[in-house]
Image: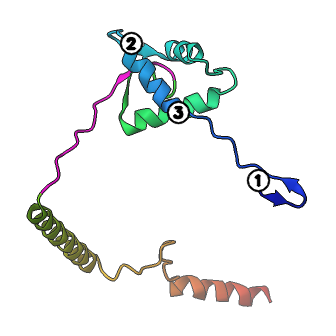
Amino acid sequence: MPRQGGLAVSPPHRRGGAGLSDLIFRAVCASTARKGVSLTAIKKALSADGYNVKKNKGRIKAAVTALVTKGLLQRVTGSGFSGSFRMGRMPKESPARPAAAAAKSRRASAARRKETKSRGKQAAAGKGSGRGNKRGAKTPKKPAARARRKAAGRKRQ
């Protein structure tokens, strides 16, 4: 153990085993419910695995939200963190493409990027310089109004 200022410092303890998102995913996979697994059922499965649900509510919430965002879980009912969940669509792993096909797609995407840039330039040219006053152009004051103010100022004196 390395010493730091006279005290022995140990590296942070890392537990082995599956992460929380893996445990949640397994709980949903193990379910046979047709309409998905409710959040309470997921929590019960986690507590059966020995996970402290009361202490780690926030972590569970974040893990479920992340799994829904990734698409691994699909929300069947409810909104946000609550509701029922089931397996999402598994991402298809495409086999490795040949190098020629990959190079062809790269060229095509570069051509598309170039085309969109030129469209943007054309649109900007049609609109004008685009460097106008963002806060709103001030209209010049009318000379008649100025003359009236000057005349009124002379009368007061």
Check disc 2 and give the amino acid type: Ser
Instruction: Identify which amino acid the numbered label 3 is placed on.
Output: Gly
Q: What secondary structure is marked by label 1?
A: loop
Name of the residue lying farthest toward the top: 33
The structure residue drawn at horizontal position 36% and vertical position 78%, both measured from the top left corner, is 130
* Mark 3 nearby-residue class (10 Å; few <14, some 14–19, many ≥20): few
> Depth check: 133 or 9 in front?
9
As drawn, the label of residue 19 is 3
Q: Which residue is mark 1?
A: 1
Q: Which residues are magenta?
A: 82-97
**Label 1, label 2: how far apart the Cα atoms are:** 45 Å
**Distance of mark 3 from mark 2, alpha carbons?**
19 Å
Q: Which residue is mark 2?
A: 31
Q: What kind of residue is marked 1?
A: Met
Colouring style: rainbow
Tell me the residue at 36%/32% (across/down).
72
Image depth: mark 3 or mark 1 in front: 1
